[in-house]
Amino acid sequence: MKYSLSWLLLAAGVLATPASQAAVTTATVAEGRLVGMQQGEVGTFLGIPYAAAPVGDLRWRSPVPAPSWKGVRNAASFGANCIQVIDPKGGQPWTWEYGAQKKASEDCLYINVWTPAKSSKERLPVLFWIHGGGFSVGSGEVPIYDGSALAAKGIVVVSINYRLGVLGFMAHPALSAESTHHVSGNYGMLDMIAALKWTQKNISAFGGDPTRVTIYGQSAGAGAVVDLSFIPAAKGLFVGAIAQSGVGTVFPMLTMKEAEQMGLDFATAKGAMTVTQLRALPAEELLKMPATAAGVDMRRGPFFAPIQDGWLLPEQQAELTAKGRINDTPFLTGMTADESSPMTPKYGSMNPQECEAAVERMTGTMAAEFKAAYLVPGADCNDGVKQLLRDRGQAATYRWIASRLGVSRSPAFIYFYQHVEPGTDPVRYGAFHSSDLPYVFQTLNKTPERPFTAKDKEITSQISDYWVNFVKTGNPNGAGLPVWPVADPQTEMLMETGDNLHARPALPEEKRILMQKFIGQGGTIGMF
């Protein structure tokens, strides 16, 4: 007896009956047919190749289309993570649920889709997630990035892997010579663009609308979102952008010449005199960073990160903004209250002399005025240093958005997040960098050992609603939520989220004037 594919899948419990109105769990994309799985109200498709494995001769080349497959591909498990050092246990404050868990491989260019659509005929807005991790770690399978809860609110959620570190961003003169554009590096960024193009081509198979894609990233992922908002090749691939904990911390990118020299130093230290020898090195060997390759001033940006190559990223962001060369979309961005806590060993525990030294490092010739404003006699000086860091970050964020609004026709929205996630030395770390992510994704259930309360559940419901509204309409506002003001450089209003959900000025007036004076004298501000 012969059976149809649909009958077999139905018998196996993969396809739901029409009466159940379950989300789609089968789809046909350009490369072939897929079968996913049901996850609550959401159809889940994991580990779909969006490009060919970048191995062998494809290492350090632009991504090429994924090969087609015959039959039905099982999309019920994540693909491998891109090459990185994986610590499945994590480390404070980023416990295990904040990190990649599966094995790493060079064969890693996979995309994941969560959809609530009942059929491919629906046209739901799409959230395209780009993970953080300093462009050196992370993946789409990190537990707190599970997209099912957000998808259940009426959007399609997509997450991706992209090449990291030396395999994702190393430039080299010989690699540039191979390129038709005479550049190298930025392979991770090219992966993101390839995944966006795959999404444009295929997301309708999952009930998504290719004309309503919002890109969303945090930390290095936020940096990637910012880069994509300038890259000419990304124009038209998305209609909104969310950059979480990454605006206002933009460092000058390495130029092509500087990046090529760094790559040449790296290859020489590895004993690889030719590209063939470089491509023959095991990926694990490439992860071992030679001391001689660390000669880059780290203040200029992360090691092996996006490059101003003159082609994909033609100029520095400030120059492109001044010329109005942006991909103009609604923009949502902000920061947490204690971004610096994991990266600052004595955060919150400095003595008075150390507090004064910290303020002096941050404010230079205006240190006396800032110490008078932030180091209040009789109060804990650490509170003053923390507040200065927060005010610097909010000022930097508004300054960046103000420059964009000068050439943009689209609105922007800014937030400040101040809820402390319970469980991992909350007094020490506060609202640390990345701690807002499980609240946006509504994935508090991924860490049952953390003592979450009803307040935590209320916060995650509210914040995820704001994010989903933005994906749907380009504006976070919606029924039942306090009004989030549009960013305006004249009033500098933002939305405080977390414990207290309300609109407020980014800085009190006297500190706003002080910060503007500092900037006017050439002072440097940033989120960290």
Image: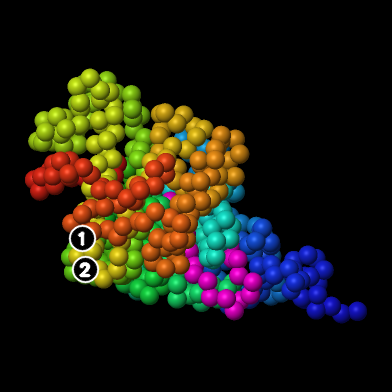
Q: Mark 1 and 2 residues: CB-CB less than 8 Å, in contact?
A: yes
User: Which structural element holds mark 2?
Assistant: loop
Q: Position of residue 72 (x, y in %)?
A: 70, 72
Answer few, some or many: residues within 10 Å of disc 1's Cα (few below 14, many 20 plus, some between 14 and 19). some
Quarter of the view holding residue 77: bottom right
Determine the CA span between mark 1 and mark 2: 7 Å
Q: Position of residue 343 (x, y in %)?
A: 36, 36
Quarter of the view holding residue 6: bottom right
Q: Where is residue 36 in the image (x, y as percent from the top left)?
A: 67, 65
Q: Mark 1 = which residue?
A: 403
At 40% from the left and 38% from the top, the residue drawn is 431
At 56% from the left and 34% from the top, the residue drawn is 451
User: Which structural element holds mark 1?
Assistant: helix
At 53% from the left and 63% from the top, the residue drawn is 157
Q: Mark 2 = which residue?
A: 407
Looking at the rendering, the stretch of residues picked out in magenta corresponds to: 112-132
Q: How is the image coloured?
A: rainbow
Mark 1: amino acid: Ser
